[in-house]
């Protein structure tokens, strides 16, 4: 308790000092040249702003996307320069406070679904460039998304001030003089604008990134963002820099993995638009992140699998009347073999990936495999694999998935019909989400209680000092 109180005291003191020093206000009519706007657009692309601030079928940056979280859906805001519905009236100072401190122009706190904890590392110059781009390079859209409405106690936005005291570290990014310029550029991009840890780092009870498990894998809805530390088995230690660059640029690396779900969106909206030098810098940095090992990974997750063909065993065998009784080979023959071939080898040119030596089947966590079978693989503007959510029942997906991991992947992976049903239902209807929400509510109330105790202690201390 004393350590927590001490940390809160230090952060409040620093916050008050910074607040007193912040007196310069720059109006929205910031003069911006084409180069500054272009730089801001590049930083916005690296930050993938469009992914969260654009609803399906809506205008870019106009908000309205409901982002599922364990505490409920958080609706993204309009960040176009509309003066009525967006951020057109923001000063540079107000824009900076929203981006790097999580405070809106009206003084209300943002929820950390907006990754301001990462954007806090942005340089002053990059924030100014972002401001120039959003004010001058984005088309204003006159729509106002619905306000985020969360259950008590999460609807108390002021509680985010306490959260920030504990989990928002001040920036901007400070280069490591012991490392190369390339490494520092990669560290800046990964930790800052690209906010990779937002998805790839597990969260603690208060939904803050667990710094002791940085980049060790996290959950994005029901998708799993895998371990990307330098561990050779669980992470990307066995990937070359060139393979990592190819994956970020193209969305796949032959013999390793292919992007799907939220990662496919990140590739399409952001990563493949970055310069080759920046992708190289990111890859160089990722290869140095301290390894975090999962004991279940007894060899590299991309190294599992060998050719296997059980289709001969089902020739001439009638399909069961109850389709839930279909075997793994029967389901594979019906839904997979046409593209992935009888032995799981994929197409010869690599356009249709091999199921062997594929991280989608090499992890003990099989959620991504199930999600791919249900939703497919979509890359703008193409559908690389159709989803089978409507064609296959929960039992069939579990049977097929179990066949895939046993023959082409990590046999430690298991898939059950109950797991498929949970993933198919979505985060909003998930029992796990309900349990997580209850646990977070208890944690939030405990945090608020600690803050109240701290304020009382601070007040008594001040009274004693005056006496």
Image (cartoon, helix red, strand yellow):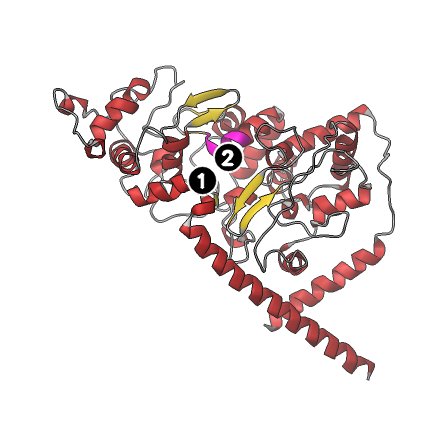
Quarter of the rendering occupied by the C terminus: bottom right
Q: Nearer the viewer, residue 351 or 233?
A: 351
Residue 343, position as x, y percentages in the image:
25, 22
Image location of residue 285, percent across then percent down: 56, 38
Along the line of sight, which residue is nearer the eye, 139 or 288? 139
Front residue of 49/226: it is 49
Tell me the SS state at disc 1.
strand
From which residue to which does the magenta span run?
259-265
Q: Is residue 230 left or right of residue 276?
A: left
Secondary structure that dominates the magenta span: helix
Residue 344 shows in this picture: no
Would you say the residues marked 1 and 2 are in contact, meaning their CB atoms lie under 8 Å apart?
yes
Mark-to-mark CA distance, 1 and 2: 8 Å
Seen in the picture, residue 200 relative to 375 is either above or below; the reply is below
Q: Which residue is mark 1?
A: 223
Q: Quadrant of residue 454?
A: bottom right
Which residue sits furthest top?
A: 349
Q: Which residue is mark 2?
A: 262
- Rendered location of residue 30, percent (x, y): 85, 34
**In this orientation, does residue 56 appear?**
yes
Picture coordinates of residue 103 (x, y %)?
Answer: 72, 50
Q: Given the current orientation, which residue lies at the most extreme bottom position?
A: 467
Q: Is residue 261 rendered magenta in the image?
A: yes
């Amino acid at each position: 308790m004393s350590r927590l109180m001490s940390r809160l005291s230090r952060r409040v003191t620093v916050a008050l000092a910074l607040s007193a020093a912040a007196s310069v206000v720059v109006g929205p009519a910031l003069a911006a040249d084409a180069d500054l706007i272009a730089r801001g657009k590049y930083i916005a692309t690296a930050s993938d702003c469009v992914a969260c601030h654009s609803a399906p079928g809506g205008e870019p940056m106009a908000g309205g996307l409901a982002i599922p979280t364990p505490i409920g859906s958080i609706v993204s805001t309009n960040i176009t320069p509309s003066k009525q519905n967006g951020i057109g009236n923001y000063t540079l100072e107000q824009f900076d406070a929203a981006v790097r401190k999580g405070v809106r122009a009206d003084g209300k706190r943002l929820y950390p679904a907006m990754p301001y904890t990462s954007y806090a590392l942005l340089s002053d110059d990059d924030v100014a460039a972002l401001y120039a781009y959003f004010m001058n390079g984005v088309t204003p859209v006159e729509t106002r998304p619905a306000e985020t409405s969360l259950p008590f106690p999460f609807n108390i936005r002021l509680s985010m001030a306490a959260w920030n005291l504990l989990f928002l570290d001040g920036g901007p990014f400070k280069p490591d003089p012991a490392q190369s310029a390339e490494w520092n550029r990669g560290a800046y991009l990964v930790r800052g604008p690209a906010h990779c840890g937002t998805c790839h780092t597990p969260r603690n009870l208060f939904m803050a990134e667990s710094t002791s498990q940085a980049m060790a894998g996290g959950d994005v809805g029901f998708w799993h963002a895998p371990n990307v530390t330098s561990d050779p088995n669980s992470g990307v230690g066995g990937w070359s820099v060139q393979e990592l660059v190819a994956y970020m640029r193209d969305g796949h690396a032959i013999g390793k993995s292919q992007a799907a779900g939220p990662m496919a969106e990140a590739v399409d909206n952001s990563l493949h638009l970055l310069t080759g030098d920046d992708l190289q810098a990111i890859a160089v940095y990722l290869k140095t992140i301290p390894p975090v090992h999962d004991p279940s990974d007894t060899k590299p997750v991309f190294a599992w699998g060998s050719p296997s063909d059980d289709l001969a065993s089902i020739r001439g065998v009638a399909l069961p009347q109850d389709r839930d009784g279909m075997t793994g080979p029967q389901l594979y023959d019906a839904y997979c073999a046409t593209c992935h071939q009888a032995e799981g080898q994929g197409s010869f040119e690599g356009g249709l990936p091999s199921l062997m030596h594929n991280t989608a089947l090499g992890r003990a966590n099989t959620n991504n495999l199930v999600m791919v079978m249900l939703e497919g693989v979509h890359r703008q503007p193409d559908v690389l694999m159709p989803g089978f959510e409507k064609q296959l029942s929960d039992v069939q997906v579990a049977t097929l998935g179990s066949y895939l991991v046993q023959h082409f992947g990590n046999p430690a992976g298991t898939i059950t019909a109950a797991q498929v049903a949970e993933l198919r239902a979505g985060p909003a209807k998930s029992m796990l989400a309900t349990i997580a929400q209850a646990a977070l509510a208890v944690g939030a109330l405990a945090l608020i209680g600690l803050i109240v105790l701290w304020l009382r202690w601070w007040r008594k201390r001040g009274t004693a000092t005056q006496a």
